[in-house]
Image: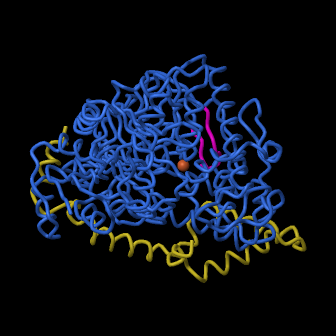
Amino acid sequence: MIILGIAGLFHDAAAALVRDGELIAYVEEERLIRQKHAHGKFPYQAIRFCLQQAGLRFHDLDALAFYYDCSRSLVCDWKVEPFFSHFQRHPRDLLGYIENLQMIRSYVEMFAKTVGVRLEVVDHHDCHLATAFLCSPFEKANILSLDARGEAVTAVLAKGEGAQITHLAEVPMPHSLGMLYSAVTHFLGFPFLDGEGSVMGLASYGEDRFADVFDHIVTPTPDGFVTQPREYWSQATVSWLSQVPNGLSRFFGQPRTYRRNPINGTDEHIAASLQAVTERIGVHLFDLLFAQTGWHDFCLAGGVGLNAKMNGELAAHPAVQRLYVPPAANDPGCAIGAAFALYARETGKRPSPLPHAYFGPEWSNQDIKAALEETGVSYAACSDVTTRGAELLADGNILGWFQGRMEMGPRALGNRSILANPGDAAMKDRVNNRVKHREDWRPFGPSVVVEQRERYFPTSISAPFMTMALPTTPAGRRDLSAAMHVDATARAQVVTHEANPRYHALITEFGKLTGIHGVLNTSFNLKGDPIVNTPHDAIAMFQRTALDHLVIGDFLVSR
Amino acid sequence: MQENGRFLDDAQRAAALRALEDEFATTLTEAQVLQAARLFFALMSSSALVQRDAVRHEVTRHIADQLAPVLEGEDDHAEEKQETRIP
Ligand SMILES: [Fe+2]
């Protein structure tokens, strides 16, 4: 059975091709069209890549699986307060809301009809739950989908056993932890979809001084949580709520505009309190799951699943033995989830867990050489890029590292990465000033080899995808000082030979040269751009920034 | 949403807005309320506001421009596949 999973038309379009339960290809549309989050786009380029990668055409497909059921949304959530009262005052907004969903539904149906493939629509949370559990290696596990919103609910507590996923509890609209996080993010002057990560970083500079405000907005309940939606739902985060000001002003004054340094004695504490309540609710939901199943393995996805700081807290939850957060926990990953969920539903069989995160486009040395020739940069063939790369890193160089198939999800995982020596604390500013141009209060993360994990992290948790901020040991704080946050946690990637042999070999070599068994790893892109995809993208970034070298396939590009 | 506006039918849209405004108006007779409610629910469950021709045009254009290599081709690959599917 061959299924093409599709996410798109809202934000973060992506496509995934699943053949007989095995993921063959996956890519985010933003990487191909070079437009971060691909707002409003349908993933034409991603679909083309997936089919070409699998050597298939549309007539080979058994089904398309789309990640959002607009019909269900249309009949459910307009009735919910405070939307209903709002729509009574502003019928035009209701019309806008209906139009958008009608358009998306028609568009997807038209696409399926035109390419002649059966269309199946999968509930949004069922996609997230499937991405969380069916990609994981666990035979049975608790599953949490924690999101801004789905069709009618914003979070689902579930359990997975084999191919079967069963809902245990749901948090209905309009109570949304994801929407609250986005609303505060916007209030603090950061953009929707990208700013949430900045606010999470900012939180570590503050203290939980506004617990009273956030405890008023969010309250845990025996089956999830409830919120005070009027305090945070607004046009800032939901376009069809026109003329609704940000309710957070009642507590914190005027909404902020973006500042490069937001630490002002108040805003970092707002971020800290938001983060604290998010973690309290996350822990509460894990408590509820554990109370129902008694199981110690947990899976987590949905937009809030990108919150590495919360995930680090959850990993330390006493009930948690293993925690799996997929590399694309957010909406693009739903392309995989939709296809996996449909496969499980129609065959009764469980899809194969993901062995790694590398299912994107790849270029041969021949392609790379052609791109190097075309752009006229000075390069040399290199027979042993791992040894040479390790030497360059040990000498204090900042490397662009471009290898193999592109990784999925928002974090670079060693195939489209910028790398540096993490043992030199000054390296963080160097990478920022010379290459990344990010706000200097935001941390970078390290990639460490699995053999040395316990040296740096006092945990046995498997962390292959940079989805958790882990506490560090004294050796970790010394060796990884440039890739660690102010609170002494690090958003780590633990690299195995099986998942990424070349990256594992590079870090191992670097360890032999320096005694440091990890590298600083940040995504290969400029602030605001998608991660590089083609050799041309990588070479262009090398030319535009002060990267010292670019290791691309079996070539070394130098200045 | 602005970007999606290109798929919408202006006349249908104006009529729908009137229906919605009626739905929420407080001075309607019982019969008018029923009629407005009927329109409203039809709107919720249909795709009445979308100009299907505009969507069809755009989808077809994108498929032709961007997906030509993976469409059903004139090569004989298609026939092979069909043969293997006959039980
Ligand atoms: Fe989502």
Magenta residue span? A145-157
Residue A16 seen in render:
yes
Q: Where is residue A319? Give x, y as percent.
A: 60, 20
The chain painted blue is A
**Residue at the (14%, 45%) spot, across then down:** B83
The chain painted yellow is B
Say if the magenta span includes residue A153.
Answer: yes
- Judged left or right of residue B26, residue A256 is left
Say if the magenta span includes residue A220.
Answer: no
Q: Where is residue A323? Give x, y as percent.
A: 50, 28
Q: Quadrant of the N terminus of chain A?
A: top left
**Residue at the (55%, 53%) spot, across then down:** A441
Q: Where is residue A508? Give x, y as percent.
A: 26, 32
Q: Quadrant of residue A304?
A: top right
**Residue at the (58%, 60%) spot, across then down:** A192
Q: In this figure, what is the number of numbered marks?
A: 0
